Amino acid sequence: MNLQREALSNGLETLRLSGQYTDFTIVADNMKVFPCHKAVLAATSPFFQTMFSSDMQEAMSNSANLPFTEETTERLLQFIYTGRRDVIKTESVPELFHAANFLQLSTLSVECEDFLSRGISPEISLEIWQIAKLFEIHQIAEAAKSIVIQNFGMFITTDAIGQVAFGRFKDLLGEVFLNCSGTVKCTAGWVWFIAQEEPSEQDARSLISVLLKAQNVENKDILGATLQTDDSDSALGNVNSDIVKERKRMWDGACEFYFIKESQPTIITGQMGETGRVSELCEWLVVVGGANREKGSLTVLNYMKQNWYSVDNAPPTDLGYRYAICARGSLLYLSGGTKPKQFLFFDEEQGRWERLNDLPVGREQHTMVTVGQDIFVLSGISREEPEANCSVYKYSTSTMQWHKDHGTISFSVAGARSVVIRRIIYLLGGCAVSQNSSKPANLPCDKIQCFDTSSSISWNFQISLPVPAKCNTFSAVVVNDITFVVHKGEVYQICEKTKHEKVCEKVCKIPNTPMKGFAVAAFGDKLVVFGGEDGNFEETRRVLQFDTSTNTAAELPMKLPIGMSNFCYTKIMVPDSWSLTEMS
């Protein structure tokens, strides 16, 4: 801050504190009055500017009541008058963050976001998540939500979870990665229900319906939820016992409505044609396209049940080939290929692929991955602009816009594999592409390239693949920050032997592994190998498994329902709206 700015801000703050020339008052929620200046407020806040230029009662009375505490109002005015960042602290940031967005103080909102981006304390994460959701600040909302779901148990009080809107509470209970048992989820539901003002039995039914669909919730959890808080009033606060009895009557009535009994199997979700429902606390895997398969068909694997399902509401669609796919949560994205500029997502509600903003430059034989809220496209070839082969493109899912100049990789390749560890993308193998060329060379390479998505810096990894390879002859996956590579039945691991030494070593051989066109996916500490062709170019239906904790391999009893080769695949959280039919 230069001398003139410092003198001005100090002078304005002195005028505010002394009350000189003030022409407006702000009243906090405890009726504490803060004299201030209209010109200063209007200069920093479109909210106040609109108020003062209208016929609003506040403009006529030269006073406004704000729904903020005395402490927050004082900090708010200190920032408006001086720009001091030290008003933002862990204990004050939730209400300041809310006030900044409520009053359209963009500079304070940015400072709060910067403070929160450096770390959100679990104690304030639930409140920050709700505020960020309210004002659609997606990056902060995602970060806060991830902390909430890992510390869910600490919020089960009427003053915390009880103040969350039903739609958002439903969103939390439906989280696959919610870090708690079914008993804790149902106790949270009961505490939330207790905290609501004048709920009806229909509200109880809506809540029970959500719990029935939640992962790992059993009937005994729902039936016993009202008993979990009987021995302690810490969760329920000072709620009147008559209110608790009335809420219990509604809860029990909702359980009867859904025929919930101790011995009855829990109702679970995830549509499966007309024959039943399925829901597991696990990730699924989706396969798109591939040789000898119907164009655009979607097939999903549930590893826990070791079953394959067809997605009935995904009609055949000509997506071309040589495209790439990735998933973020339950959203499935597809880009490039022989329709080089296409960028699509699968709309599960409509049952069709919908077009988003095109790729900045067409790509094929490329990779696409998600890191946080962003999608990155890198490697591959561009026939329209070969000079862009090394460019990295970033798509922000919050703004739904592409960023064309997000960095470059050091070496242009097509048909590579990619894995992500933290925020670094590792690009493995592929065929070299000459500078400004639209065709890859025939010979694969053994390079491993790194791209830091935070700094946009790229470099070559200090070690190479054990053999030169392109994507249809090998696959790679990450388990516990260790990259595993499968090539011609050999399993290699790439990891840090010491702080300064990285190694690539062979750990196992998997018998009967396909030679090309196969996939490797990780479920927990297990690698699952499936699809592809054997040495006689015949499609294999074997499903093989490698246990990284014991370095042992085995063939699983399940088989592929259909032949699959040279397909795209990704892990995904399957939404309830997908209509699934088990494939025999």
Image (cartoon, rainbow, N blue to C red):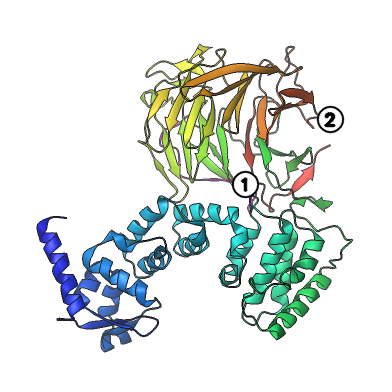
Residue 155 spot, x, y in % from top left:
59, 64
Within 10 Å of disc 1 (Cα), the crowding (few <14, some 14-19, many 20+) is some
Q: How crowded is mark 2: few (under 14 residues within 10 Å), some or many (20 or more)?
A: few
In screen coordinates, is 202 left or right of 355? right
Task: State which quarter of the image contains the C terminus.
Answer: top right
Q: Where is residue 236 in the image (x, y as percent from the top left)?
A: 64, 74
Residue type at numbered disc 1: Arg
Up the image or down, 537 lies above or below 340; here it is: above
**Looking at the image, which residue is at 78% across and 24% down?**
554
Looking at the picture, does residue 145 appear above or below residue 103? above
Camera-side mark, 1 or 2: 2
Q: Label 2 near label 1: C-beta < 8 Å?
A: no
Report x, y in % for residue 13: 19, 71
Residue 27's quadrant in the figure?
bottom left
Residues drawn in magenta: 346-364
What residue would you read off at disc 1? Answer: 352
User: Can you identify the residue that label 2 sits on?
Assistant: 557
Which label number is shown at residue 331? none
Quadrant holding the N terminus: bottom left
Q: In this view, does 148 lie above or below 410?
A: below
In the rendered image, is residue 250 in sight? yes
Q: Does the magenta stretch include residue 94?
A: no
Pick the residue in front: 154 or 34. 154
Residue kind at label 2, given as amino acid type: Pro
Residue at x 75%, y 50% (from the top left corner): 279
What is the secondary structure assignment of the residue under circle 1? Answer: strand
